[in-house]
Image: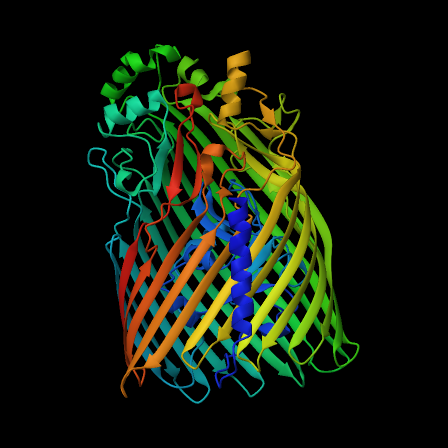
Amino acid sequence: MQHFNRTALALSIAAVSAVASMPASSQALEEVVVTATKRVEGLQDVPIAISVMSGEAIEERGLSSLEDLTVYMPNIHVAEGGAGTQLFIRGIGSGINYGFEQSVGTFIDGVYYGRGRSARGKFLDIERVEVLKGPQSTLFGKNTIAGAINITTARPTDEFESFLEVGYRTELDGFGITGMVSGPFTDNLRGRLVAKKYDDDGYVENKAKGGEDGPQQDNLSVRGVLEWDATQDLNFLLKVEHNTNDVDGRQQVISLASPTATALYQGFGDPGFRAGFDYEQYDLGFEETGLFDDTESNVAQLTVEWALGEHTLRSITAYTEYEFTNELDTDYSPLRFLNRGRTEEHEQFSQELLWSSPTGGFVEFLAGAYYQTEELSNDRHTFVVFSNVPPIESQIFSNPVLAPLNLPSTSIDGDGKNQFSQDTDSWSVFTEFTWNLTDTLRLTTGIRYSEDDKDVEKVGTLDNLSGLLPDPFFAFLWGPAALNLGTEHAYEKSRSEDHTTGNVNLQWDATDDIMLYANWANGYKAGGFDEDNSLGREFDETLGRDVSTYEDEEVDSWEVGAKIILMEGRGRLNMAYFQSDYEDVQVSTFDGNAAFVVGNAAETEVEGFEADIEFAVSDALVLNAAAAWLDANYKSFKDAACNEDQFLEQIAETGSRAGCTQDLSGKPLQFAPEYTFNLGARYDTAITDSLDLGLGLDYLWSDEVVVANDLDEHLIQDSYGKWNARVSLASSDGTWMVALIGKNLGDEKTFTWGNDVPLANFGFSKTYFRHIDPPQTFELMARYNF
């Protein structure tokens, strides 16, 4: 496998070199414009590693979300899992806890969206998506220690335009419709209105009685934008947006099951159940109702740009809010006896001021100030319910399969409550100077000072609904956490932290077509409070520390790179080598039963190389390729929680799971495949005077990757490759277009996240679930431009 990996990477780099040596033609690539430095610049002029995809390319490939897009970008991972959407760049991201800040910041039209759930929405009228790799703390602030996702949406146009687009996806039975109208009201007032509706029936078959397949989606997004040129030098842009994203069911499958779990699945769900990972075996036998995840969000943003001579002052004022509710089947069985429901509300107000100098002089500068306040409320209930379904209770406790577990003879309905409220105030000031030392040599230095204040109130109880104590079944189920059964666990805490971060960048134009750079940057991810705190107490005697809080995480990073324009603009070749060291890494680890434990327990080191190329072979044919090598490991992680096999070994020796740890020092990080690459081709030509043909083909390959932070061998996705393709016909005048898009043409079976099933004490040891990716799908799309 290692030989194949190196060979695959070598072949992709060889393909890059071969493309670059092709003879010249009249075809030149369009310049790619980005705002990664808070200015509008060409991609080849920006001295950091960036992956970019235009709105046109997103539409051509039928990509509807960040999760769809980032598979085209090596060293980037976005997937739904656990506590929400997980964003990782170069093996670095945030663990599973609703209290964690993000390691990858998400910015839409210059506004920071601080929660991972903000990345779950469907793409709507996108102009460009930039993925900035490595720490971006100077210009983008906290919580960008791995990088930033910078999304730009379309603005109103000077001339009238509109379109209507519809699409249908096979296998998912999905239907989508998008409509847009844009244009001027007066000479200095323009508007844009766009709406998108998408529904599908999912692809995971649920064979429990009355069970619905999943994940079924129902999405609606509406955005309105007004742009007003108040004067020649003063511009106002107002954006309002509303989104709903409702999901029923899950994309999870039981990939491995213990005899006890298998008996439960067969007895109460699907008699033909067998654990496995197969597209013909999407029969979970999960409970028939109650699995949903609904999100509603609103955005209001005002951007003002004022030209003051050659200088520019920009103000971005934004208010964002969302509310989501969900219910999870946390026993992962057809039985409705252990469920977790959650309601989260989040409000955020932010204000940024940015002063930009003109460019081209000896000194250029940016100076800014940022303020953000947010309120987070999270209410969670964990239900253990037997009285609603008495036959289940009697069958469980009389089931001979469960007899070896020595379950308590009585049970009482239970409710674990957790109320978490947090107020956060953050402010920062920053500046960045660029000295044009010569016509070809530039030095950039930046610094940012930040302060964060958090106040939290938390109330938690682990109780039974009848009020009768003690409950031996609860003690059996939760173990140490049940010591506080019936006792309200409450606290109020505050924390403040301040940081000074910065960057130094040296940039040299070796020729008119070759730019070389070296960059150093540091950054931090804010500390905070454990939203879950499943252990039910602040101080854990076994661990010997406060388990209700965690400290900030910090990084130092180096990067050297080259950006090359090939053959008078026919191609672009970009390369980067990087090293990053992360200290006090925030981790959340599942204990195998019913608790997650958080803390700063690790140091990691990341090293790698990335290269990407795009080349116009002819006026009709454009090829692209990207490849990456990544060596991301724990530098030190001596007290990591055990995986399931290690827990079972300790139980066999001591009779207890308590205190089981493993040393992950030198081991790889999750979501960090060693090698990844992709290859693509686009061919567009006129086949008649009035008809254009478009063809596209992409191959996406990834090395094996572990998706669990305890590095459980049962949760490793093997290396795989996927083919996607597109064929389109369009009128030469751009009036209409029809396209057929195929994804995962080889029907590869892959998964993006997984875990061992909770309740090991209840006989679910050695039982695992996985979040499985969609199978082969085809989408028929049609668009009419008015």
For the rendered model, the colour scheme is rainbow
Of residues 229 and 523, the one nearer the viewer is 523
Of residues 299 and 143, the one nearer the viewer is 143
Of residues 262 and 629, the one nearer the viewer is 629
Q: Position of residue 341 (x, y in %)?
A: 38, 37
Q: Position of residue 552 (x, y in %)?
A: 66, 44
Displayed quadrant of residue 281: top left
Q: Is residue 176 above or below residue 674?
A: below
Q: Residue at x 26, y 15 (%)?
A: 394
Displayed quadrant of residue 234: bottom right
Residue projecting furthest to the left:
210
Residue 472 seen in this snapshot:
yes
Q: Is residue 225 above or below residue 111?
A: below
Instruction: Tell whether 158 sits left or right of 204.
Output: right
Residue projecting furthest to the right:
437
Q: Residue at x 57, y 80 (%)?
A: 567
Residue 318 seen in this snapshot:
no
Q: How many marks?
A: 0
Instruction: Tell whether 497 sits left or right of 68.
Output: right
Of residues 712 and 268, the one nearer the viewer is 712
Q: Position of residue 346 (x, y in %)?
A: 48, 50
Q: Position of residue 9 (x, y in %)?
A: 54, 56
Q: Is residue 773 above or below residue 643?
A: below
